[in-house]
Amino acid sequence: MLIDLHELLQEEDGLRKYHPKLETDYFTTKTDSYLIKDYDLNISFHNEGRKHISCQCEGDVVLEIPCDRCLEPVEYKIHIDYLKDLDMNKTSEEKVAELDEEYYLDGTNFDFDVLIHNEILVNLPMKVLCRNDCKGICNRCGANLNLGSCKCDVAELDPRMSKILDVFNQFKEV
């Protein structure tokens, strides 16, 4: 959602509040894509004068992320609490020189979706588990071990015997 801040800059001590909608149902990175199950976000802008606007965004986003061990979907809540002073006097060259990463601001247009994407990306967990004692999946048949044991042979073979096992497998009846 694009929010035009031009009118707010014209009002002294102006205030705008929004309860915006996200334009996508998925949070996508270079490697993964997660379903956005739910969100409740509020954003407000306050004209501080001299082309300075304070921006405050607060709320929660719930993503459906697969468990890192068993791949079952897990609802993970990310809390967003963002507060920033937007200096509309800066040129894009000044922003680059100061390493100011306001990718969501283009002139007086504020891109809410880009801000939320960046905030989710920063708060995305390294590992998500459905529960702390998750048993994962069987590395042979792929069965979810949280639901019960599988019928796979769990005997560990000596790696030095792998060549003999290959010979036996060649003569195994089909």
Image (spheres, grey):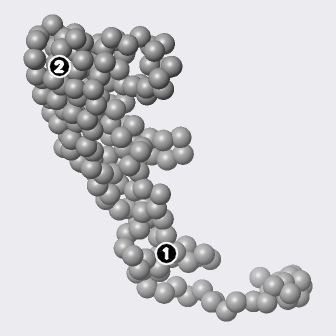
Name the mark nearer the viewer: 1 or 2. Answer: 2
Question: Whole-percent x and y of residue 33?
Answer: 45, 46
Question: Whole-percent x and y of residue 84?
Answer: 28, 31
Q: Quadrant of the N terminus?
A: top left
Tell me if mark 2 has few (under 14), some (14-19) or many (20+) residues whose alpha carbon lies within 10 angstroms of its own.
Answer: some
Q: Quadrant of the C terminus?
A: bottom right
Question: Whole-percent x and y of residue 141?
Answer: 58, 76
The answer for how far apart the CA atoms under marks 1 and 2 are is 53 Å
Work out whether residue 117 or residue 130 is closer to the camera in this orientation and state it: 117
**Residue 51, picture quadrant:** top left
Regarding mark 1 in the picture, which secondary structure is present there? loop
Q: Earlier in the sequence, mark 1 or mark 2?
A: 2
Residue under the image location 48 percent in, 87 percent down: 149
Question: Which residue is denoted by mark 1 in the rendering?
Answer: 136
Question: Which residue is denoted by mark 2 in the rendering?
Answer: 48
Q: Amino acid at mark 2?
A: Glu
Work out whether residue 25 or residue 113 is closer to the camera in this orientation and state it: 113
Regarding mark 2 in the picture, which secondary structure is present there? strand
